[in-house]
Image (spheres, grey):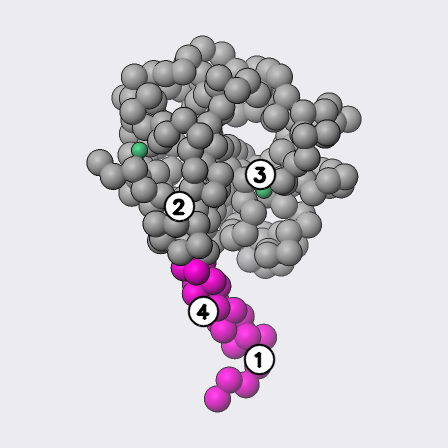
């Protein structure tokens, strides 16, 4: 098994968690022993989120998708954004809010659950009025948290531990863009994302009745 950042290895992680006996959970109740909270911060690409969601559905898994209202990369109010939310739900996902400080734009699209985008330490764990902050207790505990930030697992790829049911419960944060676009470095994955984005934008131009002849 190769510990890369590919859809194939994401599936390995899910299978390992299943072998480890985890039960999937969301942020609607405090974590309990045996819980695996799959969290995705969608920073760049709804397409990547949909690709990962298909992998989860095929594995019988589901997760909580933290979506941005103030992304410079995607627009939840566009047709593509509305479709993405509907499809993520259809595949069993829950929708939460990936907020840009200091704005919390909770509305009926979201569960009252927030993760800050690129938070500064001053407010990362601070309470949020009317919402759960997933980086504060009981959701967050450094011993029960793993993240794939910039293709770097601080404690190594968690697949082996997950297969043994360790830790007792876990919040696992992954960024869909890292897994959906090929590349053995963050730079290469981002180049893949940009290639794919260019093709998608050409299609959008056509759909927008731009003459590309
Ligand atoms: Zn691995
Ligand atoms: Zn983010």
The secondary structure type at the circle numbered 1 is loop
Label 4 CA crowd tier, 10 Å (few <14, some 14–19, many 20+): few
Region rendered in magenta:
191-213
Give the CA distance from mark 1 to mark 4: 16 Å
Q: Assess disc 1: are there few (<14), some (14-19) or many (≥20) residues with their C-alpha within 10 Å of its C-alpha.
A: few
Q: Which residue is mark 3?
A: 66
Between the residue at mark 3 and the residue at mark 4, the CA separation in whole angstroms equals 25 Å
Q: Secondary structure at mark 2?
A: helix
Q: Is residue 67 above or below residue 37?
A: below
Q: Is residue 125 left or right of residue 54?
A: right
The reply to whether the residue tagged 3 has its Cβ within 8 angstroms of ligand 2 is yes
What residue is at 29 percent from the left and 29 percent from the top? Answer: 15
Residue that protrudes farthest toward the top in the picture: 33
Label 3's element? Answer: strand
Which class describes the residues within 10 Å of circle 3: few (<14), some (14-19), or many (20+)? many
Q: Position of residue 72 (x, y in %)?
A: 64, 56
Answer above or below: position of 207 versus 118.
Answer: below
Q: Which mark is residue 209?
A: 1
Residue highlighted by disc 2: 179
First in residue order: circle 4 vs circle 2:
2
Q: In the rendered structure, are the residues bearing label 2 and label 3 in contact, judged by CB atoms less than 8 Å apart? A: no
Point out which mark residue 199 bears: 4
Mark 4 to mark 2: distance in Å? 19 Å
Which label lies toward us, 1 or 2? 2
Q: Which mark is residue 195?
A: none
Query: Which quadrant, please, contains the N terminus?
Result: top left
Q: Earlier in the sequence, mark 1 or mark 4?
A: 4
Tag 3 and tag 4, C-beta contact below 8 Å = no
Badge 1 vs badge 4, beta-carbon distance below 8 Å: no
Look at the image and say whether residue 198 sits in the magenta stretch: yes
Q: Residue at x 39, y 50 (%)?
A: 185
């Amino acid at each position: 098994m190769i510990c890369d950042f590919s859809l194939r290895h994401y599936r390995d992680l899910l299978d390992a968690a299943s072998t480890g006996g985890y039960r999937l959970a969301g942020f609607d109740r405090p974590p309990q022993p045996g819980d695996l909270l799959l969290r995705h911060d969608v920073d760049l690409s709804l397409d990547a989120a949909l690709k990962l969601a298909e992998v989860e559905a095929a594995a019988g898994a589901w997760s909580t998708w933290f979506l941005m209202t103030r992304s410079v990369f995607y627009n939840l109010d566009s047709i593509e954004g509305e479709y993405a939310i509907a499809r993520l739900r259809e595949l069993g996902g829950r929708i939460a809010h990936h907020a840009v400080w200091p704005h919390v734009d909770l509305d009926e699209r979201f569960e009252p659950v927030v993760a800050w985008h690129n938070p500064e330490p001053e407010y990362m764990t601070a309470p949020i009025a009317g919402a759960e902050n997933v980086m504060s207790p009981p959701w967050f505990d450094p011993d029960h948290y793993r993240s794939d930030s910039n293709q770097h697992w601080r404690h190594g790829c968690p697949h082996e531990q997950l297969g043994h049911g360790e830790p007792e419960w876990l919040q696992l944060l992954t960024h869909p863009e890292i897994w959906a676009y090929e590349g053995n470095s963050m730079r290469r994955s981002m180049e893949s994302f940009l290639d794919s984005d260019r093709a998608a934008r050409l299609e959008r131009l056509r759909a927008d009745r731009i003459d590309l002849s």
